[in-house]
Image: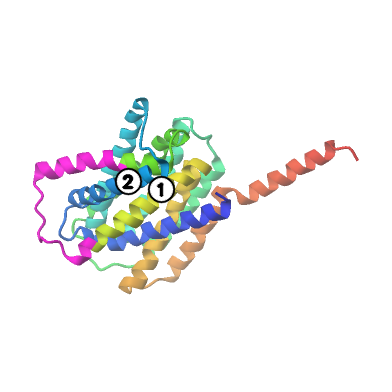
Amino acid sequence: MRKGVQEVTLLTVAATWGLNYTIGKYGVTVLSPVAFNALRFLMAAPLLLLLTSLFERSVFVEPRHLPRMAAVGLVGITLYQSFFMLSVQYASAAKASLLIAASPVFTSLFSALFKQESWSWFRQLGSLVALAGAAIVLLGGREPAGAYPDEAIGIAAGFAASVSWGLYPVVTAPLLKSYSALRITAWSSAIGALPLIAICAWQGFSPDAWPLPMPTWGSLLYSVVLVTIFGLIFWYRNVSRVGPSRVMLYMYLIPLFAVFFAFVLNGEAISFAQVAGFFVTIGGLALSGGTWRSRRQKRSTASEEGKGAPL
């Protein structure tokens, strides 16, 4: 996959996930976060396994890889998705997305801790700049006082979601050497759904309104098709090509998309500070990605090669 295509797919995934902060709220109006995700992955997992079987002619995973596959499912599906929907339910989309946007910082820390990637001060500086831009975007807006009386729960859940999502690509990376993004997504979705279904069975599945209203079904279908199947597959594919830390930088764009879609769909005003924050975030991404450093290194390498070349 060429660099331009990688960037377009990651931008599309970020936009899809940013919109989910608005659409996801319709899913938890009559369903609990656990029940919503149990239904979501109960629908998504069979589809993903079917797609894997059709495209790859096999869904086999070696027994020695099952423990790590289970860890991927528990961290990325059971924990992250539950904390994410809990934060969406109890906090504003702006604050929830800001908390989860901090996940690249945790990814860099975990990647260095598990020696998957070397520590890069430029990447950390770029991450902090991009995070600051995301904070400006979100805190530059206004929300009605008392709109979220249980916001502390949402903030705590958002922080837990950030840590979980930051760990997710680090746990996944070793499996990408042996399996496709599609197969990992299928297996992790199936494994991660099991605890969610068990919790629902223990609590008793009793939504406030049954049959579910159309907005809830729409939220479920959006989460299954675009957020889960499309989003996770292309996210994994890019992790295997450019590394977890670089891919996770696109998380900083999600709050920007969340604010933009809130403006388009809900009529929320966009302030000058939010526009400024957008450009700060883009600058942080460029700094962390090291575009100018890569060009400088290429020129330096070419110069060194030229010195040693016969005239």
Q: Where residue 37 appears, x then y in whole percent?
A: 23, 50
Q: Give left or right: position of 35 versus 53.
A: left
| Magenta region includes residue 276 | no
* Residue that numbered label 2 is attached to: 50
Q: Which mark is residue 206?
A: none
- Residue depicted at x 69% and y 44%: 297
- Residue depicted at x 51% and y 62%: 279
Q: Quadrant of the C terminus?
A: top right
Q: Quadrant of residue 166?
A: top left
Task: Using the image as rendered, state which of residue 41 and residue 170 is in the foreground.
Answer: 41
- Residue depicted at x 68% and y 49%: 295
Q: Is residue 100 visible to us here?
A: yes
Q: Give left or right: position of 300 versus 273.
A: right
Q: Which mark is residue 233?
A: 1
Q: Quadrant of residue 88?
A: bottom left
* Kind of element beneath mark 2: helix
